[in-house]
Image (cartoon, grey):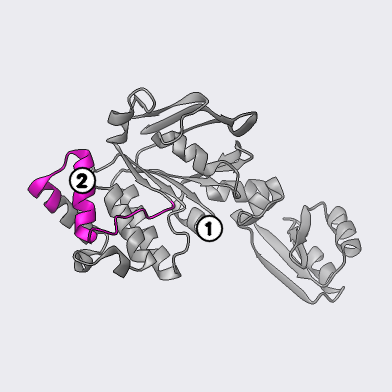
């Protein structure tokens, strides 16, 4: 294991924002934290890399205690925060060269390493550009390159693709996959279901600072919701509720309509009964992680 978190708690006064979080992360594994805003994701990640001091509990990176041996532990980490926090006074190349000095990488070694990383993230043609000349997607590439200067064993990605366009997100996904293939452990927090489902080997679902479930994306979906759901608009609660009870399925309001789980044995019957009531819209799709979170917490991940 490259990282082990044991019984992490964080309290501010009488309010516990993280409560008893424990998990491990292996080499070449992408572990996702999933939760609505305020679930405790960013605070937990901050404790993992030493920016937030736990009220209780410990974090170890390759056997090094992050609190007691912070400098040595952080030498093995790469960190991509939600903010780009790049230095606007330096160009792209010099941002990397300057940051490399924090890892005692200097001179020609820093120059070579910076050049390698610019090529790796596709920024070799932007080496002399000012930070203000970069798009949001290019800035995120540079932040990732900066996090990899020390050849870390573990990389923390806190909402890394928020605000990026679809093409830039796809590029970032490819880079995360490359990190995994190189044997790096990756911890990812995200609101994007497609991102979590595509990248993560395993997920922790957080609510109110606690882990409420964990597993592979596919396992969580099947265990919690099933294979398919129905979305329906234009019918009243008085119609939906007794139908859901009759078929023994979970349901809830969703926007202007309702969401129902498709029962595995008689899903066609439920579909037919709904169709007979002539809804404005009736659709059937594969269940996803958003449905899982809705069922477990009653919240949307975007909330």
Marks 1 and 2 close (CB-CB < 8 Å):
no
Does residue 277 sit above or below 196 in this rendering?
below
Q: Which residue is painted at 87% across and 57% down in the image? A: 241
Locate residue 237: give its quadrant.
Answer: bottom right
Locate residue 40: give its quadrant.
Answer: top right
Q: Which residue is painted at 54% across and 49% down in the image? A: 217
Mark 1 or 2: in front is 2
Residue stretch rendered in magenta on the structure: 82-111
Locate residue 73: give its quadrant.
Answer: top left
Disc 1 is placed on an element classified as loop
Q: State yes or no: residue 226 in magenta.
A: no
Residue at the outermost front position: 89
Q: Position of residue 299 (x, y in %)?
A: 68, 52
- Measure the C-alpha gap from mark 1 to mark 2: 31 Å
Q: Quadrant of the N terminus?
A: top left
Does residue 263 show up?
A: yes
Does residue 69 sit above or below 276 in this rendering?
above
Determine which residue is flagged by label 2.
Answer: 100
Q: Quadrant of the C terminus?
A: bottom right
Query: Residue 293 vs residue 176: left or right?
Result: right
Q: State yes or no: residue 85 in magenta.
A: yes
Determine which residue is flagged by label 1.
Answer: 192
Category of crowding for the residue at label 1, using alpha-carbon neighbours closer than 10 angstroms: few (below 14), some (14–19), many (at least 20): some
Category of crowding for the residue at label 2, using alpha-carbon neighbours closer than 10 angstroms: few (below 14), some (14–19), many (at least 20): many
Query: Residue 95 vs residue 108: left or right?
Result: right
Q: Position of residue 251 (x, y in %)?
A: 78, 56
Q: Position of residue 138 (x, y in %)?
A: 33, 64
């Amino acid at each position: 294991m490259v990282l082990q978190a044991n019984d992490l708690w964080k309290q501010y006064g009488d309010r516990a924002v993280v409560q008893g979080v424990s998990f491990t992360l292996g080499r070449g594994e992408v572990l996702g934290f999933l939760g609505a805003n305020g679930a405790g994701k960013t605070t937990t990640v901050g404790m993992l890399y030493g920016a937030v001091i736990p009220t209780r509990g410990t974090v170890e990176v390759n056997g090094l205690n992050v609190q007691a041996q912070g400098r040595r532990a952080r030498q093995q980490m790469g960190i991509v925060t939600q903010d780009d926090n790049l230095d606007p006074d330096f160009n792209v190349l010099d941002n990397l060269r300057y940051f490399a000095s924090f890892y005692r990488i200097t001179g020609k070694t820093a120059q070579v390493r910076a050049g390698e990383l610019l090529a790796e993230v596709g920024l070799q043609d932007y080496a002399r550009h000012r930070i203000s000349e970069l798009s949001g997607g290019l800035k995120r590439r540079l932040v990732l390159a900066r996090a990899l200067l020390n050849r870390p064993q573990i990389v923390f990605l806190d909402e890394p693709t928020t605000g990026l366009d679809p093409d830039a997100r796809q590029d970032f996904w490819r880079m995360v996959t490359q990190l995994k293939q190189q044997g790096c452990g990756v911890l990812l927090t995200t609101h994007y279901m497609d991102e979590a489902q595509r990248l993560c080997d395993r997920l922790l679902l957080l609510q109110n600072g606690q882990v409420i479930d964990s597993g592979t994306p596919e396992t969580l979906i099947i265990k919690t919701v099933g294979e398919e759901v129905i979305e329906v608009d234009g019918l009243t609660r008085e119609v939906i509720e007794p139908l859901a009870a009759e078929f023994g399925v979970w349901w809830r309001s969703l926007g202007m309509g309702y969401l129902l789980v498709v029962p595995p044995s008689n899903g066609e019957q439920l579909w037919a009964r709904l169709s007979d009531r002539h809804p404005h819209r009736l659709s059937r799709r594969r269940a996803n992680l958003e449905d899982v979170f809705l069922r477990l917490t009653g919240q949307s991940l975007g909330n």
